Image (cartoon, helix red, strand yellow):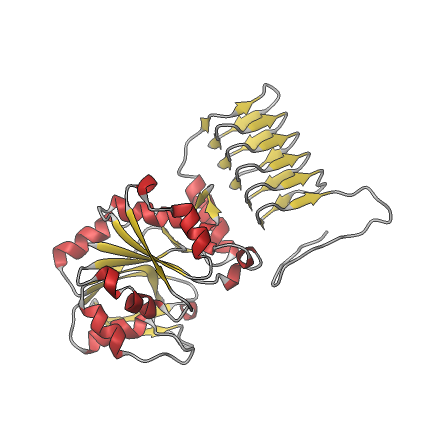
Amino acid sequence: MKALILSGGKGTRLRPITHTGAKQLIPVANKPILFYAIEAIRDAGITDIGIIVGDTAEEVRGAVADGKKFGVTITYIQQDKPLGLAHAVLIARDFLKDEPFVMYLGDNLIKSGITNLVEQFKDRSPNSQILLAHVKKPNQFGVAELKDSAVVRLEEKPKKPKSDLALVGVYMFDKHIHTAVRSIKPSKRGELEITDAIQWLIDHKFRVLPHIVTGWWKDTGKLEDMLEANRMMLDLYETDIRGTVDRQSRVEFKVIVEKGAVVKNSIIRGPAAIGRGAKIVNSYIGPFTSISSGTEVINSEIEHSIILENCRIEDVGIKIEDSLVGRGVAVKKLNEKPKVYRLLLGDNSTVGLP
C-alpha cells in the first residue's frame, strides 16, 4: 500500500505567513504539521510516500528530503497549479500504479493517527473508505449524506448542507479511483473535486464505506484551528528539560526545553515548548505556547501563541496572546517621542492594538 500527501496548496487563509512559506511546514508544538502526517502514515506500516508539491516545492524538499530520517521513501510530484484533489490523484498515476493508497491532506491532524483505519480498509476491502466528522459549519467542507450507514451523496461546500458530516482530509482508495478522476469534469471553481470522483464511484456501484471519526481531528487552515492544534499536541507531552534553566526561573507543569535553549529569570508555565537555541530572559511564557528554535524573548509575556524561528520579542509592555508570529520577526517597544505605531504588514494581516 502507498500513500499520497498533498502539500501544494497556497494557504490563503493563513496569509501573510504563507506568502513566504508552505502552510504545511508551520510548526505545531514545534514540529511542522507535515511531519505529523508522514509519521502517522509510517506508523500505519506504509513507507512508500508521494508528496504533491507546488510553489513551495523547494521548501518542502528541504525539510523532508528523501524521507530517510522518518524511515520512509519520498517521491515528489509537481503540481503546477492547484487544480483540485482529484487532479492530484490524476498526476500521481505513474507513482501510484494500481496499488491501494491513502491520500492525506498535509495540513490535517488526527490525534489518534490512522493505523486502525488502514487496518480496517485492508480487512473490509472496499473500493474507497472516507473519514467523516461532525462539524459546526459543514458548508465550509465537503459534506456526506448517509442512508442506512452507507454513503449516498457527497457535495463540496454546499450552501445548504444535508448533514453535519464533513470529509476529514484522509481518504483510502483502490485502483478504481483512477477511472473516476478521468471521468469527471472540473467544478464551477475550475477544480477536479475529489468529492465528484467519489460520487462517481458511488453512482457506478462501487463500495464506498464511511468511518466517522470520534476522536480529535483538525484542519489547520485557519489561525484559530492552528492554535487549537498547538494546544492539543502540547498537552500530549511530558516535561523534558534538556536546555539550561537557571535557579531564578520556574518551570511548571508540562514544559519542553530543548537542547541549547536558555531560560533565565523567567517563568515557563506549561503546556509549553521552548525550541533548540531559544533564549527566554526576564519573561513569562504561558500555557499552550510554542517558541521555535533561535527565537529570543526578553522582558516580555506570551501566552497561547506560536512563535516561529529566529524572532526577537523584546520589552513588549502588554502580554502577547492568541498569536502566530512568522519567522525572523522583530517585536519591540520603542521609547521614542512622539509615541507612534510603526507597522510593516503583509496582505490580509490582522493586528490588535490597545
Which percent across, then down, holds residue 271? 48, 36
**In the image, is 20 to the left or to the right of 282?**
left
Quadrant in the rendering for residue 236: top left
Which percent across, then down, holds residue 109? 38, 51
In the displayed structure, would residue 316 be above or below residue 97? above
* 259 or 224, nearer to the observer: 259
In the displayed structure, would residue 29 be above or below residue 10? above
Which percent across, then down, holds residue 65? 37, 46
Q: Residue at x 28, y 78 (%)?
A: 184
**In the image, is 66 to the left or to the right of 350?**
left
* 302 or 149, nearer to the observer: 302
Q: Residue at x 22, y 70 (%)?
A: 178
Would you say residue 172 is visible in this rendering? no
Q: Residue at x 42, y 71 (%)?
A: 139
Which percent across, then down, holds residue 153? 27, 75
Would you say residue 277 is visible in this rendering? yes
In the displayed structure, would residue 319 be above or below residue 349? above
Quadrant in the rendering for residue 279: top right
* 339 or 59, nearer to the observer: 59
